[in-house]
Image (tube, grey):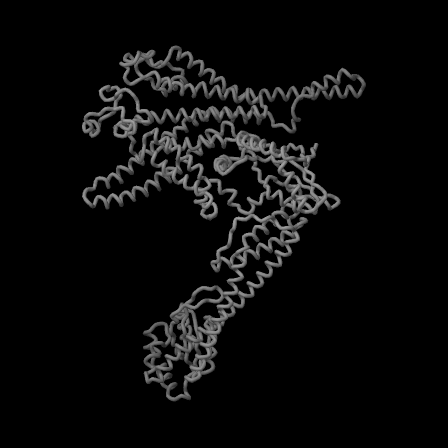
Amino acid sequence: MSEPLSFGHGPKRDLDNTVSQKIAEMGSLFRSAEMTLCQLFLQSEAAYACVSELGELGLVQFRDLNPDVNAFQRKFVNEVRRCDEMERKLRYLEKEIKKDGIPMLDTGENPEAPQPREMIDLEATFEKLENELREVNQNAEALKRNFLELTELKQILRKTQVFFDEHEGGVNPTESMTRALISDDSIARQSTLGPVQLGFLEKSYDSEEHYPCFVAGVILRERIPAFERMLWRACRGNVFLRQAEIETPLEDPSSGDKVYKSVFIIFFQGDQLKTRVKKICEGFRATLYPCPEAPADRREMAMGVMTRIEDLNTVLGQTQDHRHRVLVAAAKNIKNWFVKVRKIKAIYHTLNLFNLDVTQKCLIAECWVPVLDLENIQLALRRGTERSGSSVPPILNRMDTIEDPPTYNHTNKFTSGFQTLIDAYGIASYREMNPAPYTIITFPFLFAVMFGDLGHGLLMTIFGAWMVLKEKPLAAKKSDNEIWNIFFGGRYIILLMGCFSVYTGLIYNDVFAKSLNIFGSSWVIRNRTHYFDHKEYILDPKTSENYIGTPYPIGMDPVWQLAKNKIIFQNSFKMKISIILGILHMLFGVVMSLLNHLYFKDKLSILAEFIPQIIFLVFLFFYMVILMFIKWFMYFANVEEKDFVYGTRCAPNVLITFINMVLQKESPYDPNCGTYNMFAGQLGLQKFLFVCAIICIPWMLLSKPIVIMRARKRAQQYSVTHQQIHSATENGDAEQPMQNNTSSTLVGGHGEHDEEPIGEIFIHQGIHTIEYVLGSVSHTASYLRLWALSLAHSQLSEVLWSMVLSKGLKVDDWFGGVALFMIFAFWAVLTVSILVLMEGLSAFLHTLRLHWVEFQSKFYKGTGYGFQPFSFELLLDPASQTKEEI
């Protein structure tokens, strides 16, 4: 059944809706927003304006009602093609603008989508600009080509004049020409064919009327060697070549590139050689130019060439100025033009998803919309109707469907980065608990446990704070650098990771591998040389002469940085902290599954999954956490100052105690320590907890499939009974009494053809049980990476300090200042590149794995699909969809 929605509103109602919507959006951060499938009826004249308003709103995801229709056979395909053509013209203008280095004005405005009738004006404007620019470019190219030809002719006249001046001045031409005879190498040119060529040249220059024929031209400089060889081999040495390089590069009118060329002049005799020489020049793409033989003619031609070059320079300048003015005018509006054209194209592309009714006057659409935003969508549709001047209001009906709606989580610039981390694992199923708000705290904290260093955390905090404070100017630059976009998108994550790292660094009392003695050490060391320079010295709290008995107020005592047993002490502390944090994290994930079961009213999953899971995890692993706290509170280093602890004066090993609990073994008796029990009745309690945990395994494995199987059998029996009653009623054997029984038996689910086979249910439940039981052990051990990476980070920091920076602090005299400056720069580069970037990336990836695998596997399915609304904001700037993401 569909439910029509009204368009009534008022000021007070709008205010109430706004307040309730804000509250609901906060709630949708913990669980995806409630969605509904709606059917939209739009009049054809108002459809464009209404879709435009919905695109500005960005809260509607349309469904394709024509999946079997080819894209080229849809109603508005011609309008889409017109938009494609306008985009092509705009891209051409943009390319020409960038070629000239003209800045494109970006005012940040977001113009509304033009009306359909304005498309004609835009098309005319773009057509005029494109034709004008193409005409200007063609004229400029033709002028540049003429300019190039005149420049080459000027160089030919200048270079050949030098050659003719050498002959007229009495210089023996044969000596200079012999150096330019063409051959494969200079030796062959002089020894093999030199005499023949010399005789030819001497005979040619006997009188003016026996001058040989010649051609002059220009060729690319890199083609000269091959050009010479080809002339030599094709003309059998009966030609003479003289070439000179053009010093200044020339501009290619087609590509605009700078090329280097050379002038050449070739002398020969006979028409046959002339034809052969011209073909070779044509093959090497050499340009031939006329060159008069008489000096007066050459001088007159040179003057004419210079005059034409000056005129061409003037015309070229005017052409470039006109082209520049056209591009500057286009650059002021091209951004807005792109926005308008893309909005028009998006609207018509969306209209192609609609269906036409039988009267061809109404468009029908189906769309997913958030329930809380229905009022805003109605207002947008009303604005679109008023803009179009239509008198028929649109109709928006809610539809019932069994299809899973898309997942839509309200985010902002702060939460979107964390939401992206969750969505990278998988989009949440509809109305499933969203881990993102809890990840805001747990993700940077677990990262900081591995990255705990006050100095490194401060560097990360400064970098994140700089990106947050400068986010508006940095976002306006719209960089194409992918790595920078990742850092900038996760700026709030980096800021929080840095702040938490400062806190954990303060707890660890670790600042670039050194400590801060803020409150004064709780250890009194009278002979520092004896204690800390001796290789085997170990800090022992049992020695009351050194330990004053009160711990350091916050974090670790700074004296541990100098102790030889520092790593042993820190390993014990960090290992236990990792296990405690890991088990609490997993317990929280199991509790989150309870919230999912309660919301979906899945009582069977609560009884068959949540209860045995929480019992198994608490009775085994959380009990181990309790043992750690009991050991910390009941056992002390100096037992002489404390009362006798139950059963023993020696602190038991928690891991050994837990293993003995699983193996059902008693702790051995030690004459010096006694028994290793921490409290009375410990062995009996451990046996009870272990048995309860073991019972939970078949509970998880069999209870749910058995209940489902019995329910199906019961439903099948009810179905058979109902059929018998129905047949008896038709025969008149039963009337009213049987009708009551019928109503009571119609309890159950879907038919067997819609249900999962019971065998597959057993298999899936078995896999789930094995995964949870084994995963509880492996996931607990996986959290030890918190300890391992923290240890590796602190040790790397200490290595850099001891092997790099401390070397510079030991250099004396004035050279020590110079050495310290260079060593500090080297140490700073290694610190930032290795300890902050590489170690930070490693800790980030390990934290991501702990959330994806160890935490989210307890409750998060991630089998949904994301809400992709029709939004101009996302359409115009695809980077805006990911600029807040990692």
Q: Nearer the viewer, residue 280 or 205?
A: 205
Q: Position of residue 679 (x, y in %)?
A: 37, 12
Q: Nearer the viewer, residue 809 or 74?
A: 809
Q: Quadrant of residue 530?
A: top left
393 above or below 744? below
327 above or below 623? below
- Give the tally of numbered discs: 0
Q: Nearer the viewer, residue 308 or 264?
A: 308
Q: Position of residue 571 (x, y in %)?
A: 33, 27
Along the horizontal axis of the image, is 729 left or right of 416? right
Q: Is residue 237 visible?
A: no
Q: Residue at x 56, y 37 (%)?
A: 866
855 above or below 625? below
Q: Nearer the viewer, residue 68 or 368?
A: 368
Q: Residue at x 48, y 60 (%)?
A: 100
Q: What residue occupies the far front of the structure in this picture?
A: 11
Q: Quadrant of residue 19?
A: top right
Q: Residue at x 29, y 21 (%)?
A: 550
Q: Position of residue 160 (x, y in %)?
A: 40, 78
Q: Is residue 338 visible?
A: yes
The quadrant of the rendering that contains the N terminus is top right
Q: Position of residue 585 (x, y in %)?
A: 45, 26
Along the horizontal axis of the image, is 337 left or right of 262? right
Q: Quadrant of residue 303?
A: bottom left
218 above or below 70? below
Q: Residue at x 73, y 46 (%)?
A: 360
